[in-house]
Amino acid sequence: QVQLVESGGGLVQAGDSLRLSCVASGHVFKTYDVGWFRQAPGKERAFVAHITWNGGSTNYADSVKGRFTISRDNAKNTVYLQMNSLKSDDSASYYCAAQRLGADYSDVQAYTYWGQGTQVTVSS
């Protein structure tokens, strides 16, 4: 069993930056792909970014490409999401997910473990 805890959310202004962290329990975390997703009120949970188990490959939603960067430090069992040039449309609860078993890294159903989320609010 893997537990994921997100942190780093908050209230910021448009154009500001935030760095989210996803800390995992268990040594097997370093063998898992990890995804970041977000969910705004009244909307479905949507893919944001994905990183392979060794950090060798990353993928992003078009809406965040060039502004967000996903990275990981397996020695710390932590995955990060650096978010720059934030917009009001980025406001949502952000979730990390681990152990991708499905082929589609952008699919919510592909992941086994989920954190509780951290709230990001961007004021315009």
Image: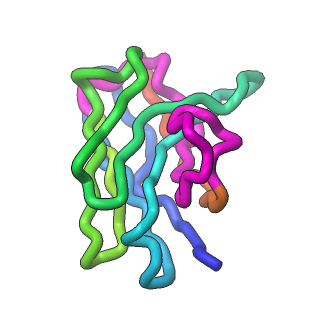
- Quarter of the N terminus within the rendering: bottom right
- Residue at x 35% of width, y 33% of height: 59
Residue 56 versus residue 38 in the image, above or below: below
- Residue at x 35% of width, y 47% of height: 51
- Residue at x 25% of width, y 78% of height: 75
In this image, 38 relative to 85: left or right? right
Give the image location of residue 22, x and y in percent. Answer: 43, 61
- In the rendered image, the residue lying farthest to the front is 103
- Disc count in the image? 0
- Residue 17 magenta-highlighted: no
Could you say which is closer to the camera, residue 94 or residue 27? 27
In this image, 44 relative to 16: left or right? right
Give the image location of residue 33, x and y in percent. Answer: 44, 55
- In the rendered image, the residue lying farthest to the bottom is 27
Give the image location of residue 93, x and y in percent. Answer: 59, 40
Give the image location of residue 57, x and y in percent. Answer: 27, 43
The way the protein has been coloured in the rendering is rainbow
In this image, 95 relative to 1: left or right? left
Could you say which is closer to the camera, residue 56 or residue 122? 56
Q: Quadrant of residue 8?
A: bottom left
Boundaries of the magenta span? 84-111
- In the rendered image, the residue lying farthest to the right is 42
- Residue at x 72% of width, y 22% of height: 43
Q: Quadrant of residue 50?
A: top left
Could you say which is closer to the camera, residue 28 or residue 78? 28
Residue 76 versus residue 56 in the image, above or below: below
- Residue 94 magenta-highlighted: yes
Could you say which is closer to the camera, residue 76 or residue 9? 76
Residue 37 versus residue 73 in the image, above or below: above
Q: Quadrant of residue 40?
A: top right
- Quarter of the C terminus within the rendering: top left
